[in-house]
Image: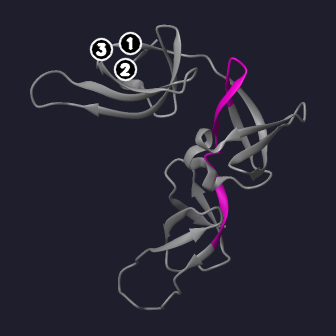
Amino acid sequence: MINATQIRKGMLIKMDDVPYIVLKVSHVTPGKGKAFVQCVLRSFQSGLSKEVRFRSSDRVQETELELVEMEYIYSADNLFYFMDLETYEQIPLDADLIGDAAKFLQPNIKVRVEFYEGKPFGIILPKHITLRVVETQAYIKEATAQAQSKPAQLEGGHTCQVPPFVEVGDMIKVNTESGEYIERT
């Protein structure tokens, strides 16, 4: 059991013996009254969504998940295919289950796939990933006295702010949790 304040987006929790995926979480502290946690949950079984409000002191049951290391292979028809590294079994995951993580997926990247009762429901990316810069503005030397950043589009479609010295074709390391630039590699 965890406190309601520890609920995070992407978690799988149980209410009345029904598993729910947490789609959205917001901690609200009104000026008058006690704080509460507002969540949008989707039933893992039926796919229906509902909004639930927990008091800060409420406790919820977090479900047990099985994590399996897999390798991303390819995507086709809104499905992403992963291969189990031990059994070489391939499983498709729907784009809805992958979510924003899709823009960081590259062939042969190793991820952990989350399973609940034998059904996959999400992935966990490595903390950092290296991507190639596909498009960015040209660097104008001494254009300003202060260091500025510029937008850069990376392979996979992710866009982040990078230092002015990063150019098209450079490989950069990106934090997959925040989507921010870390360093040029």
Where, by quadrant of the figure, is residue 135 drawn? bottom right
Q: Which coloring applies here?
A: one colour
Q: Which mark is residue 59?
A: 1
Q: Amino acid at mark 3?
A: Ser
In x, y percent, where is residue 75? 74, 51
In x, y percent, where is residue 165? 54, 80
Identify the residue under disc 3: 57
Q: Are marks 1 and 2 in contact (CB under 8 Å)?
A: yes
| Boundaries of the magenta span | 114-133
Q: Magenta: predominant secondary structure element?
A: strand
Q: How far is mark 3 from mark 2, CA to CA? A: 7 Å
Q: Are marks 3 and 2 in contact (CB under 8 Å)?
A: yes
| Image position of 158 with respect to 108: above or below | below
Q: Which mark is residue 4?
A: 2
Viewed as shown, does residue 116 lie left or right of 57? right
Viewed as shown, does residue 9 lie left or right of 36? right
Q: Which mark is residue 46?
A: none
Mark 2 element type:
helix
Specify whether residue 167 is painted magenta: no
Question: Mark 3 or mark 2: which comes first in sequence?
Answer: 2
